[in-house]
Image (cartoon, helix red, strand yellow):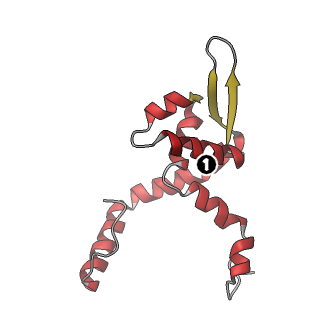
Amino acid sequence: MSLVPVPVTTADRAACPVGDVLTRVGDKWSLLVLGLLAERPYGFNELDRAVHDLSRRILTRTLRQLERDGLVDREVRPGKAAGVEYRATALGRSLLDLVVPLGRWVLAHEDAIRSARSRYDNASGTRRVKSTVD
């Protein structure tokens, strides 16, 4: 059985839960936030200070999406130290167990990827594709 049906129809793509989850966790901030929360619980303001250039609006949206997918738990703290605390769930940690080796692979092969991109760019005579490794 093939991992990908051929031809791949619009209905196939819409029905595939893999693409939906990969789109969510493949955004600019989700894995970074999840990685921080796997280390220890954070309050909202702590997270806001911990990640530069992440707006409070995007942090809020990212946390809500991670919580909706069951990757993050949100706990409201009552009393004098009232606030909200976030932590990675077991499901979120299990995702990181898969993603961290991918990150290590990228770091181990960074030079080869950079060289391949350079060869491609030089051969095609265009710099339209910008490297995200640089």
User: Which quarter of the picture shows residue 118?
Assistant: bottom left
Q: Position of residue 79 (x, y in %)?
A: 68, 13
Q: Quadrant of residue 121?
A: bottom left
Task: Please state which of residues 31 and 14 is positioned toward the viewer in this rendering.
Answer: 14
Q: Where is residue 134? Give x, y as percent.
A: 30, 59
* Left or right of 125 in this view: 41: right
Which is more toward the observer, 63 or 37? 63
Q: Secondary structure at mark 1?
A: helix
Residue drawn at x 39%, y 62% as measured from the top left: 109
Q: Residues within 10 Å of mark 1 (few under 14, many from 20)?
A: few
| Residue at left offset 68%, top offset 79% | 4
Q: Position of residue 69 (x, y in %)?
A: 70, 49
Q: Is residue 122 left or right of residue 108?
A: left
> Total marks drawn?
1
Q: Which residue is mark 1?
A: 97
Residue type at numbered disc 1: Asp
Which quarter of the picture shows residue 83?
top right
Q: Residue furthest bottom?
A: 7
Q: Quadrant of the N terminus?
A: bottom right
Q: Residue at x 66, y 63 (%)?
A: 20
Q: Position of residue 10 (x, y in %)?
A: 69, 81
Q: Residue furthest top?
A: 80
User: Nearest the camera: 8 or 90?
Assistant: 8
Please say if 48 is above or below 134.
above
